[in-house]
Image (cartoon, grey):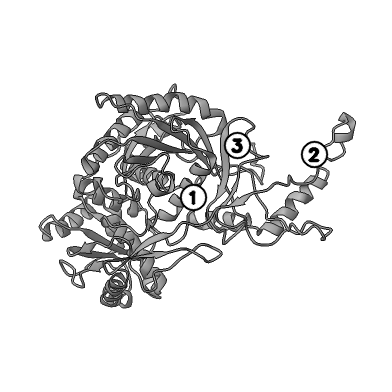
Amino acid sequence: MELCMICEGQKFLGKLSDDQTARILKMGCQRPKERKAIIDGVMRGPFGPSGNRGSEFKLHVSREMTRLNGRILQPPKLKLGDGGHIRDLVPSRHDRQWNFLDSHVFEGTRIERWALISFGGTPDQKASIPKFINQLSQRCEQLGIFLNKNTICSPQFEPTQVLNNVSLLESKLKKIHESASNNLQLLICIMERKHKGYADLKRIAETSVGVVSQCCLYLNLSKLSSQFLANLALKINAKVGGCTVALYNSLPSQIPRLFQLDEPVIFMGADVTHPHPLDDVSPSVAAVVGSMNWPAANKYVSRMRSQTHRQEIIQDLGAMVAELLDDFYHEENKLPKRIIFFRDGVSETQFYKVLQEELQSIREACSKFPGYSPPITFAVVQKRHHTRLFPCDNDPSSTQNQISNDNIPPGTVVDTVITHPREFDFYLCSHWGVKGTSRPTHYHILWDDNHFTSDELQKLVYNLCYTFVRCTKPVSLVPPAYYAHLAAYRGRLYLERYESSTFMGSSSTICRAAPPKATPLPKLSENVKKLMFYC
């Protein structure tokens, strides 16, 4: 091998740094008009299907994009809080974003006991902490969230090196927790820069200490914009047990044929995250989330498990679903009448294998409760596909079909021409694409005991996209699937540093018969188990 030369320009499969990832994303970020022009250029060029070879095979492929009609779903009316009075609002802006001017979050929490710890930072940065606490507390108050202006103990200032020492970090966090009589609601951590110790901090806080944490960077504290403080407040409120927004017209009033107020429904999301391509030892991490409140369906509890390296089927799905159903029963005093399950991260070739095994696991979980066999809807959610929709000028007098440089509007749904001829699937673009070209989400319903009509399911999914807790706009992915993705990512964080010592020996082995046994994830503390700590 010492005589070989590595050819340049090869695809790199390793994990990219944050900066490299940002540069790659920027390269592929073209506005709709530009992207369409590039695609059309490829089609007409020598490498397109209509290049020099096509005629030899008497093959003709159209160079034009498929024209089709989509529909635009109307946004739902939202319910915000207003000092105890419920206020309604319809997102009327073109991007369907709304704001909290003159109104509160739907359910604000009271945070009496909290603490702050800082890692690194210049003397000037550290001196800005009291101002930050004061402004964050004021911003929370404007949003209907109570954050005590006094922390339970004075802010702790530690050098960045503490993040490199797991046992020292753990003892520092435990000391803060004990100073709050082991009853701390929130820990805010401020870091000088992004640090690998973030993973340790999250794992220790959520599994060993039992407190939810919110991290931010000193860099963002220097310019303390109202927007930054509001985003921070929304995340904190959701983590401590509050919620941002609810649908004004409850789901039973929107789909009365299937939903009733006194017959609760659970929405579940599931995802599996795999290690990066060059890692051939680390386990995959599966996460399942389930809504715990009806009819609002906007608070989700999570379960996470590690499993065999790169296995797509969720091994412990039955156990996780059973635990979520049990939690649901404790919250609502009855089991859900229907289960609506959104599965992320499955490629088309795996559809029926996943359906076969995972639907069976869900049914087995239900059978643990005597005489319980609810109707199940199993939908696969896909973001990784190559379908792009471009808005087209329908003016018949114009000779050329003009493509606007704007993305398709939120609520655009397509369920004809480019969808499956017999099966139940649709494309829904629920968000406004600020950068690049919007990628619509593909929803493919593999099993439907509930017999949803297309209109009912499309409306349901679109409306749920407005209830995501972290922002005031509809998101691109139905929230149960989004939360499952975040929870699986959190599970991966727990493992990243937790197991690095375990696998150091085996990673140098050239040949191995089977992937190593998955390191189990550390157990979540009871204090955080029922909270949206992962969001």
Give the number of the mark in front: 1 or 3.
Answer: 1
The residue at the far left in this view is 181
Q: Nearer the viewer, residue 316 or 332?
A: 332
Left or right of 304, for residue 44: right
Residue bearing mark 1: 462
Q: Three-letter amino acid code at disc 3?
A: Glu
Q: For marks 2 and 3, give the CA distance.
A: 42 Å
Count the numbered circles shown: 3
Q: Name the residue rendered at 65%, 59% in the picture.
A: 31
Q: Name the residue rendered at 64%, 41% in the picture.
A: 6
Q: Nearer the viewer, residue 481 or 325?
A: 325
> Dot 1: within a 10 Å radius of its alpha carbon, few (fewer than 14), some, or many (20 or more) residues?
many
Give whichever of discs 1 and 3 has the lower sequence position.
3
Q: Nearer the viewer, residue 152 or 398?
A: 398
Q: For the residue labelled by badge 1, is the local secondary structure a helix, a strand or a loop?
A: helix
Residue bearing mark 3: 2
The residue at the far top in this view is 513
Give the number of the mark in front: 1 or 2.
Answer: 1
Q: For the residue labelled by badge 2, is the local secondary structure a helix, a strand or a loop?
A: loop
Image location (x, y in percent) of residue 408: 62, 56
Q: Three-letter amino acid code at disc 2?
A: Pro
Residue bearing mark 2: 49
Q: Name the residue rendered at 84%, 40% in the picture.
A: 51
Image location (x, y in percent) of residue 141: 28, 72
| Image quarter in which the N terminus is found | top right
Give whichever of discs 1 and 2 has the lower sequence position.
2
Give whichever of discs 2 and 3 has the lower sequence position.
3
Q: Name the residue rendered at 49%, 36% in the picture.
A: 380
